[in-house]
Image: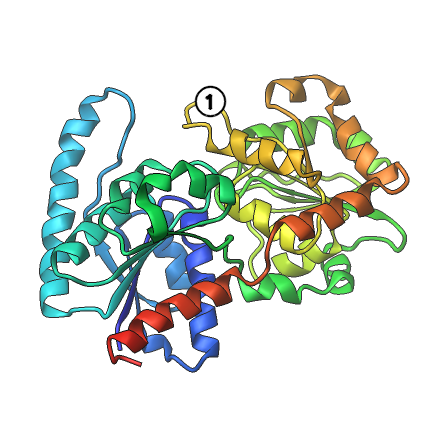
């Protein structure tokens, strides 16, 4: 059996796919059955290597929505990636391809379609990304997180299925007490977990560092800064590292509130663990997906939004303080988050993959 996955560009295109692989492994499918297809230099290569799955690198170019001479040169990279993966699939035909999006996924999806290899595509954001739009017509099924997303893609009819977003199983296994011990949190102290995502976020880091005195006066701050923006800061009630790996589920379990971006994976990890969030969505230079994700979660009572511009005012911290210290707010938001985010998406998507394999006589 050969099950191929593709996607990359950010951790949000990789970790949900790993969650689906984990669910398949728990059903007895060996890890040698899996292959991840990504770029040679993207973050997906590092993440997949960390988990020890087989990896195939292909040339890839970025899909830009604006005019740039780089678009012209990247067309050749995209074509080279298509040629490489087409011939790889021709001679090492997988039984199915599962796409998690990102620009690197387009050549594998198109090649699989031409070779009549079943393609399942998953979109994590409320609004479909460019890669998902390009891949949709060549996919046998398109899985989306929300009913609102399904309505946006109604032109594809019954191919579109609401699945939620898959979350790694270890997220559900976090131990709050262990997380407090890892960070050295004193008993009885509230915990704020700060994360800019797998690659960090300079604006989030700046806002938190400038407000450390106020934040640490009433809570303990645990801060994932990202590799490029890590600075040792000696401050009472503060624990920071460039990246939290195996310890992250325990730190999330210990958190009373998170300060974070509004990437789809981050939102669902908060949601399934019932963790209220103060969201600082990425805005400038993007298609705006984080902003609409954030507004959706705020409308359901699971989060509060603070824009990057608003973090220039020291009083942005009041959004955090309201969650922590106003009676009933933290509990109400945590319940809303859990109700909004289904926790079985990885298991559901694994079942969809197995169903296709069974119909093809490969399981």
Q: Position of residue 65 (x, y in %)?
A: 29, 26
To which residue does mark 1 refer? 284
Picture quadrant where residue 74 is located: top left
Q: Quadrant of the N terminus?
A: bottom left
Q: Quadrant of the C terminus?
A: bottom left
Residue in the picture at 37% in, 80% down: 30
Q: Position of residue 156 (x, y in %)?
A: 31, 44
Depth check, front residue: 180 or 11 = 11
Viewer can see residue 58: no
46 sits to left or right of 197: left
116 sits to left or right of 236: left
Q: Residues within 10 Å of mark 1 (few under 14, many from 20)?
A: few
Location of residue 145 with respect to 355 vertically, above or below? above
Q: Position of residue 39 (x, y in %)?
A: 26, 50
Residue in the picture at 14% in, 49% down: 82
Viewer can see residue 234: yes
Location of residue 353 with respect to 324 vertically, above or below? below
Q: Position of residue 78 (x, y in %)?
A: 16, 42
Residue in the picture at 51% in, 60% down: 345
Depth check, front residue: 55 or 341 = 341
233 sits to left or right of 353: right
Residue in the picture at 26% in, 52% down: 139
68 sits to left or right of 281: left
Depth check, front residue: 19 or 259 = 19
Picture quadrant where residue 223 is located: top right
Residue at disc 1, secondary structure? loop
């Amino acid at each position: 059996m050969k099950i191929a996955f593709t996607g990359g560009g950010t951790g949000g295109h990789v970790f949900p796919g790993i969650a689906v692989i984990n669910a398949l492994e728990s059903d007895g499918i060996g890890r040698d059955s899996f292959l991840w297809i990504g770029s040679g230099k993207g973050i997906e290569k590092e993440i997949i290597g960390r988990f020890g799955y087989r990896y195939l690198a292909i040339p890839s170019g970025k899909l830009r929505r604006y005019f740039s001479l780089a678009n012209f040169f990247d067309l050749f990279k995209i074509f080279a990636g298509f040629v490489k993966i087409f011939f790889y699939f021709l001679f090492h035909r997988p039984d199915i391809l599962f796409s998690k999006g990102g620009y690197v996924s387009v050549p594998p999806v198109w090649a699989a379609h031409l070779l009549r290899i079943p393609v399942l595509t998953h979109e994590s954001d409320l609004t479909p990304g460019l890669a998902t739009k390009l891949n949709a017509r060549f996919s046998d099924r398109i899985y989306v997180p929300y009913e609102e997303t399904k309505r946006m893609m109604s032109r594809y009819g019954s191919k579109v299925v609401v699945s939620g977003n898959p979350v790694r199983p270890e997220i559900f296994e976090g131990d709050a007490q262990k997380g407090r011990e890892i960070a050295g949190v004193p008993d009885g102290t509230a915990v704020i977990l700060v994360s800019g995502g797998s690659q960090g976020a300079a604006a989030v880091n700046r806002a938190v560092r400038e407000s450390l005195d106020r934040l640490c006066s009433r809570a303990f701050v645990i801060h994932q800064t990202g590799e490029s923006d890590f600075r040792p800061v000696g401050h009472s009630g503060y624990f920071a590292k460039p990246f939290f790996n195996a310890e992250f589920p325990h730190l999330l379990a210990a958190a009373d509130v998170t300060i974070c971006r509004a990437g789809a994976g981050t939102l669902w990890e908060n949601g399934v663990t019932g963790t209220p969030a103060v969201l600082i969505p990425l805005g400038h230079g993007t298609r705006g997906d984080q902003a609409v994700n954030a507004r959706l979660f705020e409308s359901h009572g699971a989060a509060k939004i603070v824009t990057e511009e608003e973090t220039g005012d020291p009083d942005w911290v009041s959004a955090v303080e309201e969650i922590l210290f106003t009676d009933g707010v933290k509990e109400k938001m945590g319940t809303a988050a859990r109700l909004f985010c289904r926790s079985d998406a990885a298991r559901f998507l694994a079942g969809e993959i197995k169903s296709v394999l069974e119909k093809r006589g490969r399981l």
